[in-house]
């Protein structure tokens, strides 16, 4: 019995390793800021009237959700047409200062996608987030995007993306 206790003690001691806490040093964690994308205040509409496209000016604001958070290296403002991840285009690249506001016109959308706007088209604007050299896509081909936030994120003031619809 005495030898068994000594053997168990030796095996237990040998199998132990140093652990620096809940997250071992071999695991790297990047601080990816929560970024909100919302319609700019002041009467901006999310509807593009098909018969009056020339009058449309959609305004969006992209900002850090938590004041004082470490900002990303940069963001690219991207737009997805009709909810299809394969249709994503860069609207504004290399935005390094947040908050940032943008005015979108119907002609910008038709030029960017190379086709005229059609009734029931939707255009979703959101940021691709860069932390150092790593890119977190707003609308990846698979999985959830960078703007989906933490489960249970407050809906007060947080917007994953802004959608403009042609009616």
Image: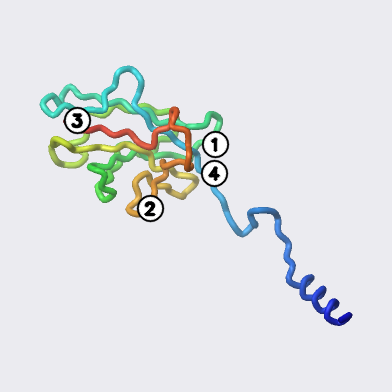
Q: Residue at x 16, y 42 (%)?
A: 114
Pointer 4: what residue? 31
**Between disc 1 and disc 2, whose residue precedes?**
1
Q: Within 10 Å of the Cα at label 4, are there few (<14), some (14-19), or many (20+) other Cα atoms?
A: few
Residue at mark 1 to residue at mark 2: CA–CA distance: 25 Å
Circles 2, 3 touching at the beta carbon (< 8 Å): no
Going by the image, does 68 lie left or right of 61?
right
Circles 1, 3 touching at the beta carbon (< 8 Å): no
Q: Residue at x 69, y 53 (%)?
A: 21
**Between disc 2 and disc 3, whose residue precedes?**
3
Q: On residue 70, which mark appears?
A: 1
Q: Within 10 Å of the Cα at label 3, are there few (<14), some (14-19), or many (20+) other Cα atoms?
A: many
Circles 1, 4 touching at the beta carbon (< 8 Å): yes
Q: Is residue 32 above or below residue 157?
A: below
Circles 1, 2 touching at the beta carbon (< 8 Å): no
Q: Quadrant of the C terminus?
A: top left
Q: Is residue 26 above or below residue 92?
A: below
Q: On residue 143, which mark appears?
A: 2
Q: Residue at x 64, y 57 (%)?
A: 24
Q: Residue at x 26, y 29 (%)?
A: 104
In the image, which is nearer the foreground, mark 4 or mark 2? 2
Q: Callout 2: helix, strand or loop?
A: loop
Residue at mark 1 to residue at mark 4: CA–CA distance: 8 Å
Pointer 3: what residue? 106
Q: Within 10 Å of the Cα at label 2, are there few (<14), some (14-19), or many (20+) other Cα atoms?
A: few
């Amino acid at each position: 019995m005495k030898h068994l206790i000594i053997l168990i003690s030796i095996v237990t001691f040998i199998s132990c390793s140093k652990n620096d806490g809940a997250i071992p040093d071999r695991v790297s964690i990047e601080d990816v800021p929560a970024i909100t994308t919302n319609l700019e205040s002041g009467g901006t509409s999310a509807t593009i009237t098909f018969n009056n496209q020339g009058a449309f000016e959609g305004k969006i604001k992209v900002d850090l959700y938590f004041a004082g958070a470490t900002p990303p290296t940069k963001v690219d403002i991207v737009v997805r047409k009709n909810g299809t991840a394969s249709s994503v285009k860069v609207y504004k690249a290399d935005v390094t200062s947040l908050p940032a506001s943008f005015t979108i016109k119907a002609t910008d959308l038709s030029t960017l996608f190379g086709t005229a706007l059609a009734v029931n088209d939707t255009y979703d604007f959101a940021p691709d987030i860069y932390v150092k050299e790593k890119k977190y896509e707003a609308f990846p081909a698979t999985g959830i995007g960078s703007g989906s936030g933490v489960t249970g994120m407050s809906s007060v003031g947080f917007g994953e993306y802004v959608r403009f619809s042609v009616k």
